[in-house]
Amino acid sequence: MRAQGNVRGSKVLGAPSKPARARPELAEPEDVADPRKPRRVIDYSLERRRALGRLVLVATGASDNLDPHPDLLRAAKHHGTPVEQKCPWCHREDMVMLRYTWGDELGDFTGRQHSLAEIDEMAGEHGQFRVDEVEVCPDCHWHFRLRSYVLGDGRPRPALRARRGETLA
């Protein structure tokens, strides 16, 4: 005996869908002395050290930190900024840094990779957004989110929307 409707994949056809999520209102204004200075910094270096320890213990080469999404490797190849330190896993010197921005104010443009200069400019144009710094080794595929922090001038603004015909590359 079947439930309501036909079953295809994981959705039961004819079943009620989830209600639409209400869009959050703009946050309260925040006093920010310097919009380009990170605040609410989260440092993931201890988690990185723990991940490296797990890799050494397992010593199989299979790990979440060595199996990145293909888009992350592609972004590292074409947009990564070289860093001075060696890869903690393979010890090569080809490590790069990627910086992704996230936030309600960024609207359709959230989740994109940006350079430091672009992020610095965005800090003065937006009230609040988060930056995730991800290190990537293109050789062995090691990747790890090193740091996450908030930038912006503290004045909430409405979300950006892509214009008609504009692509979200």
Image: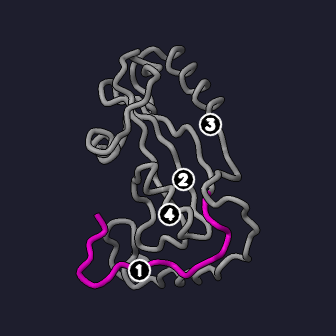
- Asked if marks 4 and 1 touch (Cβ < 8 Å), the reply is no
Quarter where residue 36 is shown: bottom right
- Which residue is labeled 1 in the image? 161
- Asked if marks 1 and 3 touch (Cβ < 8 Å), the reply is no
Q: Amino acid at mark 3?
A: Tyr
Where is residue 111 drawn, in percent x and y? 44, 60
**Front residue (pair 18, 103):** 103
Left or right, 92 with reference to 39 = left
Residue 131 is marked as 2
Quarter where residue 83 is shown: top left
- Alpha carbon separation for disc pair 4 and 1: 16 Å
The colour scheme used here is one colour
Judged from the image, the secondary structure of the residue bearing numbered disc 2 is strand
User: Is the residue marked by circle 2 packed among few (<14), some (14-19), or many (20+) residues within 10 Å?
Assistant: many
Q: Is residue 156 magenta?
A: yes
Where is residue 152 drawn, in percent x and y? 61, 63
Q: Earlier in the sequence, mark 4 or mark 3?
A: 3
Nearer the observer: mark 2 or 4; the answer is 4
- Which residue is labeled 3 in the image? 44
Q: Which residue is pictured at 70% across the width and 52% down the height?
A: 40
Q: Earlier in the sequence, mark 4 or mark 1?
A: 4
- Which residue is labeled 4 in the image? 122
Q: Amino acid at mark 4?
A: Met
- Alpha carbon separation for disc pair 2 and 3: 13 Å
Q: Amino acid at mark 1?
A: Arg
Left or right, 49 with reference to 119 = right
**Front residue (pair 23, 12):** 23
Q: Amino acid at mark 2?
A: Val
Judged from the image, the secondary structure of the residue bearing numbered disc 4 is helix
- Alpha carbon separation for disc pair 2 and 4: 11 Å
First to last magenta residue range: 151-169
